[in-house]
Image (tube, rainbow, N blue to C red):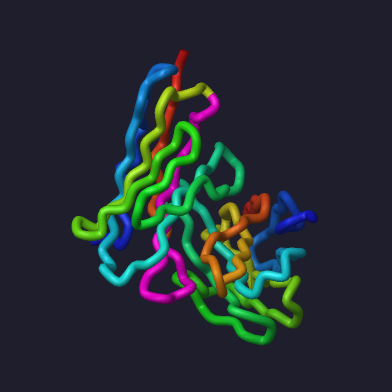
Amino acid sequence: NAGVTQTPKFQVLKTGQSMTLQCAQDMNHEYMSWYRQDPGMGLRLIHYSVGAGITDQGEVPNGYNVSRSTTEDFPLRLLSAAPSQTSVYFCASSSGQYSYEQYFGPGTRLTVT
Amino acid sequence: RKEVEQDPGPFNVPEGATVAFNCTYSNSASQSFFWYRQDCRKEPKLLMSVYSSGNEDGRFTAQLNRASQYISLLIRDSKLSDSATYLCVVNGGGSYIPTFGRGTSLIVHP
């Protein structure tokens, strides 16, 4: 039981490049989320999903896209990277129906130059 | 006013001390409350859920005060390994979307 996995662990991009951050969970959780964490800002919700085929925007969605074609996977796409997107990105999942307790992946540290 | 507020600290305490953190929330319809622990450069991990009746797990005690809209975390007999940032998380009114506090930093020294 791997829990929530994220790849890559580290990534450096140039401004304007695009990439996809991968997130997968093996707990059959319905709810999945993407957060970014910046120094002094705490965790901010980017996008979330309450089930396969359903996604919605969080607090800071601009510049990011998501899709949820399966229960297990919830990739985050950066469309055209900007230095302001330099951050640590965490994916999380929750069973939702009975508990809002969230389980986080180990994070992806992204630097945009 | 922020929805969930925490004193950022740091709280700097000696081993063996008792330390308490509070977290205030603004949404009176909030229903689920949690404390998470985050070590430096690591992901947040669930420490405790907070129930209306309060709950205890070893050296850790969490309490909820709905009237004053705050939750608390008490750590007794602090260990060096308790050094971390403690995040308060609130889910409001049936919404899946949680609100995170910015965290309280705890440093336990010998």
User: In the image, residue B10 lies at what x, y percent?
Assistant: 36, 32
Q: In the rendered view, would you say A111 is above or below A25?
A: above
Visible residue check, residue A108: no
Q: Examine the rendered structure and indicate whether residue B38 appears above or below residue A75.
A: above
- In this image, A101 relative to B65: left or right? right
* Magenta residue span: B81-99
Between residue B75 and residue A61, name the one nearer to us: B75
The part of the image, by quadrant, that contains residue B61 is: top left
Write the residue at 44% across / 24% down. Answer: B78
Quadrant in the picture for residue B69 = bottom left
Give the camera-side residue of A2 and A53: A2
In the rendered image, the residue lying farthest to the front is B53
Q: Residue furthest left?
A: B68
Q: Residue at x 43, y 23 (%)?
A: B77
Residue lying furthest bottom in this view?
Answer: A53
- Whole-percent x and y of residue A85? 56, 60
Q: Determine whether, in the image, residue A28 is placed left or right of residue B94.
A: right
Residue A47 is situated, as x and y percent measured from the top left of the image, at 55, 73
Residue located at (45% from left, 49% from top)? B35
Judged left or right of residue A96, residue B108 is: left
* Magenta stretch contains residue A65: no
Q: Which quarter of the image is occupied by the N terminus of chain B?
A: bottom left
For the point 42% across and 76% down, the residue is B94
Q: Is residue B109 left or right of residue A4?
A: left
Q: Is residue B82 magenta?
A: yes
- Residue A7: give x, y in percent of width and height: 76, 57
Residue A47 seen by the camera: yes
Kindly give the residue lying farthest to the top in the view shown.
B110
Quick check: B84 above or below A104?
A: above
